[in-house]
Image: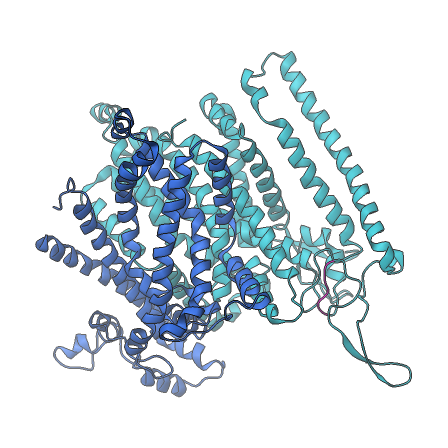
Amino acid sequence: MNGMMMTPVFLWTDIMIWVLFVLIVIGVRQIIKDPHKRNQWRSVFASRTSMVSILVLVMYFMIALIDSVHFKVDSSTETSNHKELVSVLDIGLEHLILNSERTYSAPFALQEYSSSVVYNEQGQVQQVYLPLKNVAKHIDMDPNLVAYDVLSQVAWAFMGTLGVLIFISIIHGYFYFKSLAENTVAVKEKSLPWGTAYVTLFIITLVSFSLYSLSFDYHVLGTNKVGEDVLYQSLKSIRTGVLIGGLTTVVMLPLALVLGISAGYFKGWIDDIIQYTYTTLNSIPGVLLIAAAVLVMQSIMSNHADWFGSTEERADMRLLFLIFILGMTSWTGLCRLLRAETLKISQIEYVTAAKAFGLKPFSIIRRHIFPNLMHLVLIALVLDFSGLVLAEAVLSYVGVGVDPTMPSWGNMINQARLEMAREPMVWWSLLSAFVFMFVLVLAANLFADRVQWVLNPRSKK
Amino acid sequence: MFAYIVRRLLFAVPILIGVNVITFALFFMVNTPDDMARAQLGAKQTTPEMIQSWKQDHGYDKPLFFNHNSTGLDKVSDTLFVQESLKLFTFDFGQSDSGRQISSDIYERMWPSLAIALPTFIIGLVTNIAIALLIVLFRGSTLDSITMGVAVAIMSISGLFYIIAGQVLFSKTWHWVPISGYADGIEGIKFLILPVFIGVFAGIGAGVRWYRSIFLEEITKDYVRTARAKGLSEIKVLFGHVLQNGLLPILTGVVVVIPTLFMGSLIMESFFGIPGLGSYTIDAIQSQDFGIVKAMVFLGSVLYIIGLILTDISYTYFDPRVKLS
């Protein structure tokens, strides 16, 4: 990106995901300060599966974060191949955008996937597989050398990974021995599965290094119909998935909390109205309510095209709307849970005592009820995450998901679906989308299970 | 009992009115008929006359709540809200954009939807309960943990994957069943096998986990200990006591789904080319046919509320301790 003007741009979803990040950091600090919570979360991470899951989740979240810092590139300068709006991730993966091909090519292929008709020097018609434009230049596209080249690049990545891990373990060791010397190390600290954590970290780093190194010379996951790199698309889709999974519950949290607590605490006609509201919303089938709302939104957006500066901004606005609409249909469940729990808590003696002391309702809710609802909120956050990521794919397939120009697993599946009829099949686009989605959802599910088991006071331990 | 049902049905009326207000607000107030006309007619250079004639064709050229030009009762009744929204209560859904009667379309398409949804539901329920009972029998063993691991994995894979993989394997590669289509009667069975199988398989993960937790909760109760103390074998304890008592929460939990089976599955039906209500809805969404989407939203809410009432009734029927009041 040499010599180009770059001005930072803040999309709405960028701001939201960074706010979410700050909230998580604040939450972690709170947990570290409070010994009881600290112990609870230590027990979450004491399980090997949740240690692996959290590392995978952190990896996805980090990619989503670096994909959420956008710059506007002054497109008047040279290469028109660029999109107007680029993120830090785009800058890191610039070679993948520039190395696009003409059409389909299989993973690690040196030729196009389907043959094309060309005229040779004698003017005869020939069916040939055209070589790809941007692969394996350094080995002169010699098919015999590909396997060796891949292996040697992976070997280099292996060395790099070892280096990184040694560096991390030195830092880890420094803090461990420091706390040992200051005698602040908790006895239970040893019980965390550090071995598993290191193995996971090793695998994640090795895969990322190898993929990154190989992506300069090959289309590791192939290319799609218009020749775009599938690895690039899959990585760009992470942001969409994480945003929908992570933010949907968060944006509706204030509403669910206020309504749920007031229904449970004040009872009477307030309770009746709130119950009526969520029963009504709940009785509309989710997909249909989302579809109806998205259709209406689409119609409004197409009638007011002048509201949005660029296609990216429009796509971003649509994603934001989708998050709110999904939140609209999903807050009812949490609201009902919060209401029931508030009803139960407000019967307990200490709340009665607080009332007898003349505390105002607001301070009773703040001091005695709200802190006892936090576990429900956290459980809802992690439980909803995986379902929402899967829902995005289905909604995009139905045509009421994210904007068709926005990279997302649902859009990838939707575009590749028609290619299943081809003979032989174009499978890599579909499989990449499914695998990237599966890893995220599986990690989220496993982590959610553990969090629920630890935080739910009713689960038997 | 009868009085209770009548009372519950009366409770449903304000909820349905609420649903109507929401859909009305979405379709006519947020997105005015003028906007709809512009979106449907496409081009930006649509003239006011074109919009007016489109609105007349669809009967959308009336005021929202109050008609000043009419006389008497028509002042209220000759409005969009009464004509387009309250009319739904008589199950008169009007015409779709292609000029067909929505009500008769829904009636026709209900049966193919049911032909897929009902077998999927029943076979799924039986399979899930059977697997859950089996792993409860072997609880705490390696089999248990492996099954639970597989269940989480099944849950974590997108439903779209099962459909695409199933079609590629069973239809494209092995040619066991046709890839998509539908026929009435006996011939239709060959079209139904694959979607039903995929539907059942995709539901195993969540189902088994849920039923297992129900059975495990049941198995710690006192009566089970008594039964074991009397010398009953584990099999007899499971099938004689745990299954019967565990079925209560399972049944009351699934009853709410039964009426909504009529609605069909959006994804299944569109992938397998089944002319049911699911694909009807998807087509309507993609062609932006607001009339059909509105009708399906209303129908879905009605069916859901029927499901809620059935749940309450099934509670009293299966568990005499619960009294309706």
Q: Nearer the viewer, residue A4 or A372?
A: A372
- Look at the image and name its color scheme: by chain
Quick check: A249 above or below B18?
above
Q: Residue at x 62, y 57 (%)?
A: A431
Q: Residue at x 33, y 34 (%)?
A: B217
Quick check: B234 above or below A297?
above
Q: Nearer the viewer, residue A211 or B14?
A: A211
Q: Where does the image place residue A342, in percent across and percent down from the top left?
A: 28, 36
Give the mark count.
Answer: 0
The main secondary structure of the magenta stretch is loop
Extreme residue in the left direction: B3
Q: Which chain is blue?
A: B
Q: What color is chain A drawn in?
A: cyan
Quarter location, residue A173: top right
Which region shows up in magenta?
A: A103-107
Q: With B164 as the anchor, is B316 left or right in this view?
A: left
Task: Answer whether residue B71 is visible to the viewer in this image.
Answer: yes
Quick check: A154 above or below A428?
above
Q: Where does the image place residue A307, in percent across and percent down from the top left?
A: 51, 66
Q: Where does the image place residue A210, in percent across and percent down from the top left?
A: 75, 46
Quick check: A317 above or below B316?
below
- Inspect the magenta stretch and tell me whether residue A59 lies in it: no
Q: Where does the image place residue A380, in percent across and percent down from the top left?
A: 41, 42
Q: Residue at x 50, y 52 (%)?
A: A389
Task: Answer whether residue A261 is visible to the viewer in this image.
Answer: no
Q: Residue at x 56, y 31 (%)?
A: A48
Q: With B211 as the anchor, is A280 left or right in this view?
A: left
Q: Nearer the viewer, residue A203 or A8?
A: A203
